[in-house]
Image (spheres, rainbow, N blue to C red):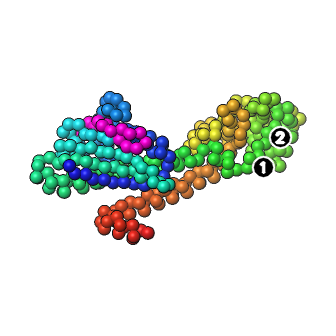
């Protein structure tokens, strides 16, 4: 029996990495030329799935090992695999090493055609398996990196990066007083709290302008409850940056209150906060892409001159 192995170091939570490694859709997205993965029966140990390949049709795989948070092994069933092998297993594992997690893709296989199979192994099986497993583990690492980015910036993290001061008013506050607060603090909206300290509405510059167009100057001496927006769209601390951007874009709003599980106000996120958070995210994506490119360079050099020599060259 012959073997081939590729690995990749990534950062992230073990639960998240394991979820990605065991997700059939992620495998389809990461596997070169794989169109889709169809689960035929079961889950975890004993699961049987059909892998549809762009060039070689499809083949079935069965999960014969399953150790949560550690490894799982898929064994090819039948003779429809894209390579001339009588036996093939793909073991996907992860191991925590200091601050990183090492993902390993290991193949164990037996070539067809007896002695001639060793010729095929050298000139066909090894090159194709090595290319497939290298791209597979690299693409899985990219998915993990993107998942980390998606999870790293949330409403809670945005609120931590800005002032904790929240400007609120009551429904009985006069429009003139509200305008003064908006001007002095250079903000675009005020949260209206009811007697129970929960959100009763929101007053924005747009609400005031609309009120002036219908009421005129007398609006200044009227309470804001006559002009505020009552149906307030809110977010929650765990909402991701992507979710916050989607809400603001679809609802055409510039200020988004954040409430806890009991509907109490914990902060307000503005469109400016979103822009700053997105800039941070782009910087992280750029750093992650740079790390990915450097990793690919190291892997290519390592394949040519060996891991030890490549480590010295890139140190």
Horizontal side, residue 59 vs residue 236: left or right: left
The quarter of the picture where the C terminus appears is bottom left
Q: Is residue 1 above or below residue 48?
A: below
Say which quarter of the image contains residue 175. top right
Circle 2 residues within 10 Å: few <14, some 14–19, many ≥20:
many
Q: Give the residue number, with chain letter if any, for mark 2.
A: 178
Say which quarter of the image contains residue 307. bottom left
Nearest the viewer among 211 and 57 is 57
Q: Position of residue 303 (x, y in %)?
A: 31, 63
Nearest the viewer among 65 and 149 is 65
Q: Give the magenta part as a residue range.
A: 57-72
Q: Position of residue 304 (x, y in %)?
A: 30, 66
Q: Give the residue number, with chain letter if any, for mark 1.
A: 186
Residue 166, numbered label: none
Horizontal side, residue 120 vs residue 180: left or right: left
Horizontal side, residue 196 vs residue 233: left or right: right
Q: CA distance from mark 2 to mark 1?
A: 12 Å
Magenta segment's dominant SS is strand
Circle 1 residues within 10 Å: few <14, some 14–19, many ≥20:
few
Identify the residue at horizontal 63%, vertical 43% (top origin).
155
**In the rendered image, is residue 259 in sight?**
yes
Mark 2 element type: helix
Nearest the viewer among 272 and 285 is 285
Horizontal side, residue 174 vs residue 104: left or right: right
Nearest the viewer among 23 and 9 is 9
State which tag comes first along the sequence, 2 or 1.
Answer: 2
Q: Do labels 2 and 1 touch, CB within 8 Å? A: no
Q: Position of residue 238 (x, y in %)?
A: 60, 40
Say which quarter of the image contains residue 223. top right
């Amino acid at each position: 029996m012959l073997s081939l192995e590729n690995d990749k170091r990534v950062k992230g939570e073990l639960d998240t990495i394991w979820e990605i490694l065991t997700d059939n859709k992620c495998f389809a997205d990461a596997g070169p030329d794989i169109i889709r993965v169809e689960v035929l029966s079961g889950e975890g140990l004993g699961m049987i799935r059909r892998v549809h390949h762009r060039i070689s049709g499809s083949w079935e795989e069965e999960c014969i090992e399953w150790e949560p948070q550690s490894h799982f092994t898929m064994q090819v069933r039948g003779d429809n695999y894209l390579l001339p092998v009588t036996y093939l297993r793909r073991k996907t594992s992860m191991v925590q090493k200091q601050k990183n997690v090492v993902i390993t893709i290991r193949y164990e296989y037996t070539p067809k055609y007896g002695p001639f199979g060793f010729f095929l192994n050298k000139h066909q099986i090894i090159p194709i398996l090595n290319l497939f497993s290298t791209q597979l583990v690299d693409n899985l690492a990219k998915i993990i990196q993107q998942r980390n980015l998606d999870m790293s910036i949330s409403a809670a993290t945005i609120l931590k990066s800005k002032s904790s001061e929240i400007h609120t008013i009551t429904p009985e506050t006069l429009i003139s007083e509200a305008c003064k607060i908006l001007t002095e603090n250079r903000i675009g909206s005020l949260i209206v709290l009811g007697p129970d300290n929960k959100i009763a509405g929101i007053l924005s510059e747009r609400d005031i302008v609309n009120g002036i167009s219908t009421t005129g100057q007398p609006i200044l001496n009227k309470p804001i409850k006559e002009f505020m927006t009552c149906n307030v769209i809110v977010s929650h601390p765990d909402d991701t940056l992507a979710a916050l951007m989607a809400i603001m874009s679809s609802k055409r709003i510039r200020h988004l209150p954040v409430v806890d599980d009991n509907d109490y106000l914990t902060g307000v996120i503005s469109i400016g906060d979103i822009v700053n958070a997105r800039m941070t995210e782009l910087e992280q994506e750029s750093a992650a892409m740079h790390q990915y490119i450097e990793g690919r360079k190291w892997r290519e050099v390592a394949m040519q001159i060996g891991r030890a020599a490549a480590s010295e060259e890139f140190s």
